[in-house]
Amino acid sequence: MAKRKFIYDPDSLSYKQVESQSKKWIMFFLAGLIAGVLAIIILLSSPNDYFQTPREKNLIRENEDLKLNYALLEKKMQKIQLVLNDIKQRDNNIYRTIFAVDPIPDDVREAGYGGTDLYKNLDGKPNTELIKNAMQEAEKIEKQLVVQSKSFDEVVKLAKNKEKMLAHLPAIQPVQNKDLTRMASGYGWRIHPILKTRRFHYGMDFTTKTGTPIYATADGVVKHAGWKANGYGKHVVINHGYGYETLYGHMSKVAVRNGQKVKRGQLIGYVGNTGLSAGPHCHYEVHLNGKKVNPINFYYNDLTPEMYARLRKLAKEENQSLD
């Protein structure tokens, strides 16, 4: 059994046991050993955090700054993209609609940017992905700006030629109201007078006596004047430009020739009953970009609101057409 030593303490007037110095040294050594082992474990798990050179510290700081700046740049690009999207919507749905031109498809506005090898020279450099993403976004915006700029150039040109364009849009009836007997049939499903079947009637029939004058409804160039075996008999087709054409069917006599320039209100022929027709009338059609549209929407130059409302009501009646 180990001997224990005591020493008298005059302050407390008692004896205290003297601790062994070897025990103190052992405890101190064990504590240091444990601290050293823990330090080594921490250093081995993330050595870069504890053994960074000044250059590495600068690079890390630069990377953090670059990421922060990229995040700010990305937010700015997102705001620019929102503005561009708004301009695109107004361009397609307002500006281009006013001048009856087709909207620019999204695949045209956004096509042609980027490429697999366009940024190949950036591979292997620091922050390659961040730089690539930033350049791709910038190129996308640049492409959209170019397309939008060209679109606005077109709209400005159309605006400058607005007066000329309006003269080329169908805007009057082909037969004057004073000469009309009645408006026999409008645009829509009707019973064909000859075939006795329900067919879609792509124009409007203006009933009047044979020989009544027929007038061009807008400026243009005569595309066809004469007879053709298509049911319209003697008829005239006028190309007005801007995607518009008009057809005047079943004439008794044609008063223009192919290739002739005509003005709105100019005499182009006379009402008749030629072709597949059940009585004297002028069959009138309006075509826009190759599609037959309702002519009722193109009489705003020569009808009062009351007259237009009455004509619209008559055109909707599902009666028998004259062709």
Image (spheres, rainbow, N blue to C red):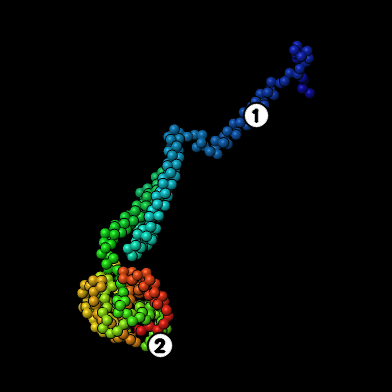
Q: Is residue 241 above or below residue 272?
A: above
Q: Nearer the viewer, residue 4 or 54?
A: 54
Q: Is residue 78 left or right of residue 171?
A: right
Instruction: Decide which of tag 2 and tag 1 comes sooner along the chain.
Output: 1
Residue in view at x 77 percent, y 22 percent: 2
Residue in view at x 43 percent, y 47 percent: 75
Report the quarter where the C terminus lies.
Answer: bottom left
Q: Is residue 306 above or below residue 113?
A: below
* Residue matched to label 1: 30
Please identify the quarter of the rendering in which residue 204 is found.
bottom left
Q: Nearer the viewer, residue 97 or 78?
A: 97
Q: Is residue 166 above or below residue 39?
A: below
Residue in view at x 21 percent, y 72 percent: 261
Q: Is residue 122 above or below residue 253?
A: above
Q: Position of residue 41 (x, y in %)?
A: 58, 36
* Residue matched to label 2: 196
Q: Disc 2 residue type?
A: Lys
Please identify the quarter of the rendering in which residue 30 is found.
top right
Examine the rendering and report whether any part of residue 228 can be seen.
Answer: no
